[in-house]
Amino acid sequence: MKLHIECFPCIFRQTIMTLDRVDIPDDIKMDCMFKVSEEVRAADRDKTPAHITTFIYRKIMEYANVDPYSNVKHQYNEIAMGLMPELETLIKDSDQPLWTASRIAIAGNIIDFGLFKEFDIGAIIKRSLEPSIAVDEYLRFKEAIDRNNKILYLLDNSGEVVFDMMLIRLLTDMGKDVTAIVKGKPIINDVTMEDASQIGLQDVCNVLDNGSDAVGTILEWCSPEFRDIYNDASLIISKGQGNFETLHKDNRNILFLFQSKCDVISRWLQVEKGSMLLGSKTFESLR
């Protein structure tokens, strides 16, 4: 997945959305926009959109001198935790708890403030539990989990992490040894160790950070400790579009759970924007 011409207006839109969240003078915001323009101009067009987006958010953090998403991350963790009793009942009462938990985890991927200002979580959860989704390799997903006792789970967004925690708890109840991975530093509304602590994820599974502030999982920017864990993993569950962008070419046993949120990726995957996907990196059901 390389940088596409349609990525550029999206990058500037994300920059404006993020700057709207910080209380700094307009002239400083304008200076930041010019610096972002320079980053875009210098972008390596052979890299993924996640590479340039990471540079952009680093530049915004430099000018804002504060995490623009800190408050909203905490807020949506609380909102998601408020939904837990109802969702846990759905999973417990399901004829196929793993199926239901995986669908709920995909539904949580809508909580992405890098792309959206608002979303209807309830409606997305309801849609996720419909009989079919755009890409549904659930049998491959279940078989992979049945075969592997150790699972590396790459988390994505705050708020969404609560939905992931319900799937992770089910996996641990099945006897699986799950290690969840958070970001090493704040980036957009991605999960950090602080978010994991807020929702009590450490009480459910082992939680480690990848040593990086990159969008997605850009392996060369991650810590050597994380790369060792990643390379040793027999099964990886990857949440989110950013992780798909950066890892879909990697020759690992990876299962991707996410929603296709942009036109470029949706067109490349031959699905409608907003589609829910559960499958391997090859997405064989599309080929």
Image (cartoon, rainbow, N blue to C red):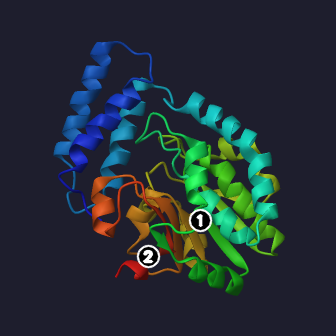
Q: As displayed, is residue 248 above or below residue 207?
A: below
Residue at x 68%, y 65% (from the top left corner): 100
Q: Where's the C terminus, which quadrant? A: bottom left
Q: Where does label 1 land, which residue?
A: 225
Q: CA distance from mark 2 to mark 1?
A: 24 Å
**What secondary structure is found at the residue carrying circle 2?**
loop
Task: Spot the residue most to the front.
Answer: 131
Residue at x 67%, y 73% (from the top left corner): 151
- Give percent across and percent down for residue 75: 64, 31
Q: Is residue 222 left or right of residue 235?
A: left
Q: Quadrant of residue 250?
A: bottom left
Q: Where does label 2 land, which residue?
A: 281
What's under tag 1, amino acid-wise? Answer: Glu
Residue at x 66%, y 46% (from the top left corner): 193
Q: As displayed, is residue 12 above or below residue 224?
A: above
The residue closer to the viewer here, 181 or 99, is 99
Q: Which tag, 2 or 1, sits closer to the chain's start? A: 1
